[in-house]
Image (cartoon, grey):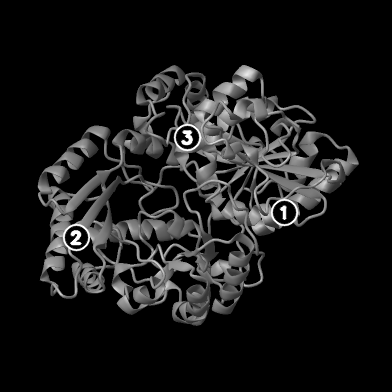
Amino acid sequence: MTKIEPLLHKVQKAARYTGDELNSVMKDAAQVTTRFAFCFPDVYEIGMSHLGMKILYHLLNERDDTWVERVFAPWEDMETEMRRAGVPLFALESRDAVSEFDFVGFTLQYEMSYSNILNMLELADIPLRSEERNEGMPFVCAGGPCAFNPEPLADFVDFFLLGEGEEIWPEVLDIFAQWKASGAPRQAFLEQIAGVQGIYIPAFYDVQWDEQGNFAGLTPNRPGVPETVQKRIIRDLDHVYFPDKLVVPYMEIVHDRVMLEVFRGCIRGCRFCQAGMIYRPVREKDSTTLCNYAEKLISATGYDEISLASLSTSDYTQLPDLMEGLLPFSEKEHVSLSLPSLRIDNFSLDLMEKVQKVRKSGLTFAPEAGTQRLRDVINKGITEEDLMRGARLAFEGGWSHIKLYFMIGLPTETEEDILGIADLAQKVVDTFYAVDKSKRAKFVNVTVSVSSFVPKAFTPFQWEAQDTIRTLKEKQKLLKDAIHSRHIIYNYHESYVSHLEGVFARGDRKLCRVLEQAHQLGCKYDGWDEFFVYGRWMEAFEKAGVDPMWYTARKRSFEEALPWAHIDCGVTTAFLRRECERAYAEQVTPNCREACSGCGAQQLDCMEWRKKQ
C-alpha cells in the first residue's frame, strides 16, 4: 500500500485521492487471481460521473476472482507532490501501485485526453510502448467511443475493446484466468483473445503506406486474426447487468446524481454525430425495470436527483409509463427528475411540468444550425417552428432560461447560416415577450453555446475537410458581432482545441510519434484551458515530422483508405457514403421509426427493423 497521507495536506481537494467512499468495493488482494485498474484519463470529478465506469466497476467486482479498482489522473498539485516524493500512480481502493495490476484499462471518451494516458503510464512506471512491456507487466487496454479509431494510440495499447464491455470483459477474464494458471508467455494471452469478437490487437496488424508515405491499408500479420474486427453489442438490455448501488463520492462531482440508462443507440441519424452511428441499433429497457433500479439506487446512495441517460431521451417509447412510475416515488422522497436529452420537436410542457415538480432547472435544446437548409444538410430533422413552439411552451410554463447548442464549420456552411444562429436566438427572446405577462417569468436569458464541427470516423461526414483555425475564428467573430440583445449570452469553444481534436479523430499510427513528443514536452490535460498549450503541440508535430493539416484541411475521396476501415461498427460504408451524398443534395433521411434507411444495423438485431418486417 502506498502511503499518501503526507501528501494530502499539500493539495487541493484531497478527497480525490482518499477512496473508501460509500459502496466502494474492498477485497483481499491475496484472494483474487486478477487485478484490474480501471483508469479514467481525467480528474476524479469527471471520471466519477461516467456511467460506463460505474457499470463495469460493479459488474466485474461481482466475480470472486477479480478485483476492479479505480484510477484517475492526479491534478497538477498532486502529481507534483507524487513525483517529488517518488509515489507512483496508485488505485483508490487498495492504494497499491498500478504497475502491480494485471490489467490497466483506459476508457477513451475524448481525443484530448490522450496525452493524459501517456502521463499516467509514466507515473505508473509502465513502459509507454506495448513492444517494450515484458513478462509480468500489466496488459494495457482501452475501450470507449474513441476506440473506434484506435490507430493514434496503437503503439501504446496492447489491445482495444470495441463495443459494449458487459459481454466482452467476462469472456476476456475467463481466458486470462486460464492463461495465468498455465504459465504461458505474455504473447500467448494476446493470441488467445485475438479471436474474441470486439478485440483488436494493433501489434497483430501491419500498416501499409503508399509511395508518398500516406496510409494505404492495414492487414493481419499472423493466422487466426480477423481482417475486420466487429463491435460487440448487448441485444437485451432488460437482462444485462446494471448496478443496484453506486459509489458515492465525498466531494461534489460533475454529475452528482443517479443515472438511469433508458436505451442505447439513436433513431435520428444526424450526419455529424458519431455516437448516433456507432451505438446503433436502438435497444430499450422496460419502464418497470427502470423504476425498480431507481428505487434501489436512491436507497443505496441517498441522492436526491435521477437523470435519464440516453442520446435522445424523448425518443424513448415508454417515457409516459416511466414518468408515471417514477413520479409518485420521486415526490414522496423529494427526488428531482431530469431529462437532459430532449428534442425540440417532441417537447411537452405537460411532461416537463411533471418532471420538474421537485426542482425546476433550465432547458437545453440543440438546433445545431442556424438555417433550415443547413439543418437539412446535417439531417437534424427539426424546424424553426419546432423551436419557437418549444420556447413558447417553456416560457408559458414559467421557464426563463433556455440554452441553445449550435455548431459552426459544418459542411456547405455559408455566412447566412452563421447569421441565422443570431437570428434564431433573437426570435427565441422575442417569443418570450410575445407571451402574456401573467404567464411568463419576469426576465429571460438565452445562452447560445457554439462548438466547432469536428469530422469523426463512422459518420457520413468522415470524408469532410475541417475548417482551419483562422476560418473558425472569423466565423466566431461574425456571430459575436451579430448578437446585440443583452438577453443573449454567447459562448464558444476554443478553435485551437477543435483543430487538434480533428487531427486525432481521423488520424493514423503516425500520430503515436506526435503523442510521444507532446508528452515529452509536457502536454497533459489538453481538454482544460489552463493546461492546453497549442505551441507545444505544433512543436511536437514538427519534431515527429507529421503535418497536422493533412488530417484536417483536405476533403478525402470516397476511395481513400481510411485508418479505421478494419473496424466494423455495424453501419456500412455504403450507407455513410449515401448519407454524405444526400447531405449535399440537402435531402433529409427519415428516422428509423419512420422508415428503415438500410444502415446495416439489421445484422445486429435492430428492433426498429424487426418491427417493419
Residue type at numbered disc 3: Phe
Residue 90 is situated, as x and y percent measured from the top left of the image, at 67, 33
Q: CA distance from mark 3 to mark 2?
A: 52 Å
Residue 101 is situated, as x and y percent measured from the top left of the image, at 74, 37
The answer to whether the residues at label 2 and label 1 have Cβ atoms under 8 Å apart is no
Q: Residue 395 appears in which quarter of the rendering?
A: bottom left
Residue type at numbered disc 2: Val
Pointer 1 or 3: first along the chain: 1
Left or right side of 410 for 272? right
The answer to whether the residues at label 3 and label 2 have Cβ atoms under 8 Å apart is no
Write down the residue under mark 3: 215
Residue type at numbered disc 1: Leu
Is residue 507 visible in this depiction of the protein? no
Residue at left 42%, top 37%?
527
Q: Nearer the viewer, residue 30 or 498?
A: 30
Residue at left 23%, top 71%?
386
Write down the residue under mark 1: 60
Helix, strand or loop status at disc 1: helix
